[in-house]
Image (cartoon, helix red, strand yellow):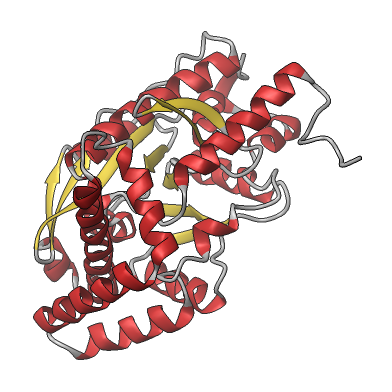
Amino acid sequence: MPRSGGQFSFSEAQATDVTDSTGPDPRWLTHGLNNGWFFTLSYRLVRALPRSISYGLAAIGTWIAWHAMGDTTRAIEDNLRAVVPDASPRELSELALATYRSYARDVADLMAGVWASPAESASMFVPHGVEMFDRVRAQGRGALIVTGHFGNWELGGLLMRNLGVPLDVVAMPEADEQVNRMRHTFRQQMGIETIEVRQSLDTALQIRQRLAQNRAVAILMDRHVDRDRVEVQLFGRRAYFLRTPALLSYLTGAPLVPCFIVRNGPRRFDVVAEDAIEVDRTLPRDEGVQQVAQRFATVLERYIRRRPECWYQFYPYWKVQTDEASREDRKRLLPNSQGPPPNG
């Protein structure tokens, strides 16, 4: 059972730490759209050109990427096959192109939007249910805002700034240092503090400290990091989400608030805060954590089904899940096994 007042020990904090791992799968971070030259060039063009021309160039560039980045395009198609199982190969290919284009427009709007004034940024958003943030924080335990690699999640900092909600973002460092610096700059401009995952207890303790200050902490939950994982069902398939948000919710009582930011037109976004997911702290810890994670996975699945082109997984998402499931099955059969047996 969690300790009263949401306090937990160093050993419990270590169990929550997202750095209890060998790091993220490199395939997350090394696709052709996530490198310094692409980000730098895109940023300069977006800042210099009218929005309509930026969108036009993005359409041309993503058409080229759709043809030239064969491995990435095939990965997107395979990922989306679970979302639209009845789609033909041609329809999946067109949906992959739509995903490239949606991502490029979202990046363009992020790069332009971070410099918008509060009045300008307010016109970008159509909020739905955002009073949930104040309602949750009124409990005094902070809020864990959870989302997936879906829509324009980074742009949410502008809305939170306008709402007066203090926000921290937990983020993995990017593989490309230039991309990492630019993303930090964007967040700083929006008034967001970054909690970067480190190789120590520091990350979990920082998150706990921010929640104790009644701040909102945002975490992407639809990718696990090595041992920081919890099993869920997503589109009828076995998948592994990040365990840390659900476990911190169990230990501290801070609710999870699913939030999604989805384009509804040029530089216009619906921002939806779903009902808070309250953890049942009377359950055994692992059961309570899994239940909360599954509830979020079910919500995320609903949004992806509506707008599959906004799910930005540019690597073989399901292959990683299958590999992880195989390792878990081996561990259940052979508790001391951490992987395949050595050759010979």
Q: Is residue 174 left or right of residue 189?
A: right
Judging depth in this view, the residue of 133 and 323 nearest the camera is 323
Identify the residue at horizontal 71%, vertical 25% (top origin). 330
Identify the residue at horizontal 42%, vertical 38% (top origin). 142
Q: Tell me residue 11's x, y (percent).
A: 75, 31
Q: Is residue 45 left or right of residue 320?
A: left
Q: Residue furthest bottom?
A: 48
Judging depth in this view, the residue of 261 and 298 nearest the camera is 298
Viewport quadrant of the N terminus: top right
The correct choice, above or below, for 273 with respect to 32 in the image is above
Q: Tell me residue 224's x, y (percent).
A: 54, 41
**Is residue 72 among what the camera can see?**
yes
Viewport quadrant of the C terminus: top right
Q: Is residue 168 left or right of residue 14?
A: left
Identify the residue at horizontal 44%, vertical 61% (top origin). 71
Q: Tell me residue 325's x, y (percent).
A: 59, 30
The correct choice, above or below, for 77 with respect to 328 in the image is below
